[in-house]
Structures are given as C-alpha cells and as structure tokens.
Image (cartoon, rainbow, N blue to C red):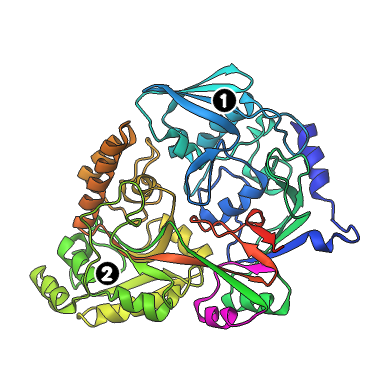
Amino acid sequence: MASRMMKLAGTAALVLAAAGAQAQELTIGTKLEVSTLDPHFFASFPSGQSHSYLYDRLVALDDDLNLVPGLTESWQALDDTTWEFRLRQGVTFHDGSAFDAEDVVATFNRIPTVPDSPNSFTRYVRPITEVEVVDDHTLRFHTEQPTPQLPRFLSNVVVIAAETELATTKDFNDGIAAIGTGPYKLDEWRRGEKLILERFDDYWGAAPRWEQVEEVTLANDGARTAALLSGDVDVIDYVPVADLPRLRDDDDFSVFTKPIARIHYVHMDSSRVPTPHVDAGDDSNPLADARVRKALSLAINRAAIVDRLLLGMGVPASQMLPSSFAGASENLAVDPYDPQAARSLLAEAGYGDGFTMTFHATNGRYPADVEIAQALAQMWTRIGLTVQVEALARTIFFPRATDYEFSIYTAQYGTETNLDMLMSMLHSRNTDLGLGTGNRARYVNETADALIQEAMITTDDAARNALIAQALETVFGEHGLIPLYWPSFAVAARTGLDVAVRANARNTAMRITPVD
C-alpha cells in the first residue's frame, strides 16, 4: 500500500503545463465545494459530483437516472436473497493495477468503518451479509432478506482500490489514497478553491474529451456569473435566477435547464418538548401538533415563490418527487394557499395568539434560498406568528442541522428514488439499520417506518411502489415534512459548448462537449 500511495502522491504533485493544451482544457465554475476526496466519508451531493471524475460505481445511471452498467457488465437475482454481479474486465486503476473482485470486497469492508461520517453510505451496503467471490470478475451478494433495490443502492457507492481499504480520510484528502478507475485522475486539490484533474488515457469507457479539467469553487452567485462573463471560466452551474434573462439574451452564452430529482422543503422538530428555537410562552412544542404543521403549509403561497423568486425555475410540490418517479402517490395534492384556514387551525390547536420561532436556512447554497426563507417568514407572520430568519453558510448550517440544533429549517435534498428519500430523510434515526441519516428534524412515525422497511424487501415492483406511496401519504398526511417545490437546474456556458444536463444535477466535464 505504501508504494502505491507514494506513486500517486508523485502524480498528484505534477503541474500540467504542456504547450498547446489550451484547446483541451475546460474550466468549470461551480457553486459546490468539495469537502473531501474520501468517497466513503460523507454521502453529500457536492463531493459526490466531483468524485465521479476519480471513481466509478458498480452500477451507473443514464441521463434520466435509469440503471446502466458501470464497473459491472451485468447483474441478476439468482433468488430472493442472492444477487450475482459480473464485473467488467480490462479495467485499470490510475496507477495501472487491474480492477477485480477484491477491490469491491475492500470497498464494502471499508464503508461501515469510516469514522465520524456526517451521513454514512452504510445504508446502501448494510443489507449484504456476505460477499462471495466466485472468480476474479464474478461476485455474489447474499442478503438476509430480499433486497430488490440492491442494484439501485449500489449506484450510490464508488469503488476504491483494495490496497486503500485501510486508508484514512486524511490519506484520501492528501491525494495519496485517491486511486480510482474514473475518467480523470487527481492533479491537485486546494480545499475551498479548486480541483484540477488530468485525463486518464487508459480509461475503460468513452475517452475523456478534455485533457485537463479545473473545477473552481465560486460559492458566491455574483462571482460565478462574473467569472463566466469575463471568460475566466467556460461553464457555470447553479446559474443565479436573477442572471438568467441576461445570459439568455446574450449571443455569447447559452443556458441549459432541466427539472431535477430534488425537493426544496421545510422540516420541523416534531419530537422534542420543548424545542430550542420555538417559544409559545410555555414548555410546549407547537410543531409537535399536526394541525400547526398543516397551518404552516397552508400559509405558503408556493406559486408566488416559484414565479417571483425563481422566475419559473421550479414546480410547486406535493411530495418528495414528481409523479413520474416510481412510488409517487396519486392521492397527494399541493396544499392550497389558504391563510384563513391556517389561522383557524392554529386557534384549534391552542395557538390562536401565535408563537415565536427562529427559522434556519442556508445562505447562498441554493437559488434564492435566503429570499425564499424570508418570504416564508413573512407568510407565517401574516397568520399571527413571529418569525426570525437566521441564514447560515452551508459549512455552518449542515453540521448544526446534523447535530439537531434547529427547530424548523429549510433546505433541499436530492436523490434518484422516493424510497431512498424515505430511507434517509423520513425514517426515524436508526444507526443499526443505517436509516434516517438525513432526518435532521427527529421526525418519527412508526407506521411510516414499518412501510419503508417492508418496501425495502418487497420484490414485486407494483407492490413495492404501493408501499412507498402509502408511506408518503402517511408522512405528508400529518405534514411530517412540508414540500415547497421541485426545482429546475440551470447551467450556462460560453457559446460553442453544449451541456447535457442530467436529472440529478451533476454537472461534470463528461457532460460538456464542443459544438461541431
């Protein structure tokens, strides 16, 4: 392991300076900051996007989030508790070593052992009780219970080299363990500033188009747009809503948009009594009352938020994902804007005189996130509440949210399936099962928990989707979470580049090509 790490460390220290390489270079200004190069430390969207340069998954996703072969050429269920995966041959890691079954075994061994993970990948591999190596390129995964979604689960997990199984997160962050089979290999990473990647010419898949890719972290919306206008970057993601009309009207730039598998939501602490950031004049927690949660939802004018603050870049939401996604309920409708009914519900719950609360939000993480939080606070003020907004940088917001410091907050969550959203966000926290890792509001509903766990082991697609829909109806029937809208994703590029926007909003160099 030591020699292998030293070899990559030397590679990571090189600086690309080849003359005439400019035409092969691409610079992307991204809002998202890579917090770690350890692909198993934190199941978070920002780092996961950049990890796709360096690492591959057993099962990949196409542009519409359908499962397609990745490092696995094919897979099949041999019976209810056995899956066989046939691995791709001829794949090499960035240091030239061959990929085989032992690398997958090492990956699955490492994931549950990574310390201090804010949101572990363990839930994706926990159903596996045994990994049977049939041969160098054939694996059988045995599970205690039927796990029909195992291929989907494994699309979230990247594969590392077996020799790095015992590497620490620091080893990955230092670059010496960041060995993958992905289309690009690490050149340099400066935390909070940039990630520089070099084309991996021995990549098993389609040849990478760009010789060098530089991801520049530009969290500030204005700075990101300014960098595109000045030519400092070729492409930017998360185009600020206010800048969309200007860029669309400028022949020097193109804007690409697509609805994405994500929900902007409000989550509430409905378990603690009292809860730290709500004052009702006594020790009660108004948010524990489903009537209060429904009142908050009825007070929200979702159409106004989408039309005025997002300039149409979203759709009012009724549940986690739109109806086109498996398991979505046909019985859930968008709550109407009805402040009078909201006031009546507050009075019925015993809070006719209102209460005071601090509403937490991100600052600059999502399009118009501060403006949306302020608009929600104003809408709730109109039904008699006193609301203070505290907007925080993502580096402060998410650790505090993970530590359950908030009583009510707004954020976004994205994944490819309703079941995964339920498992992460709306199942009660269960470290033994790896469930509820994204449930930052202590929400608990035992009926929903049972439905989610049953859906996880149901092999029949129709029956599983019915269970998922029932779980969604259970949660949203008591407003365990308030859905706001399903956002669209916007990328802008200099003229001459084409961007294929994906439904999971991962914007990478692999999706960007010159226009012929």
Q: Is residue 462 above or below residue 242?
A: above
Of all residues, the one furthest to the left in this rendering is 348
Q: Quadrant of residue 56?
A: top right
Q: Callout 1: few (<14), some (14-19), or many (20+) C-alpha neighbours within 10 Å?
A: many
Classify 470 as above or below 128: below
Q: Residue 145 at x, y = what percent? A: 34, 25
Q: Which residue is mark 2?
A: 278
Q: Looking at this view, name the residue that lies furthest to the top.
A: 134
Query: As displayed, is residue 349 above or below residue 419?
Result: below
Point out residue 355 in the picture as x, y percentages from the top left corner.
Answer: 21, 75
- The percent coordinates of residue 97 (x first, y second) are 75, 30
Q: Amino acid at mark 2?
A: Val
Viewer-side label of 2, 1: 1
Q: Could you tell me which residue is drawn at 32 percent across and 32 percent down?
A: 457
- Which residue is depicted at the point 19% across and 73% down? 281
Q: Which residues are magenta?
A: 234-251
Query: Is 8 positioned to the left or the right of 433 in the image?
Result: right
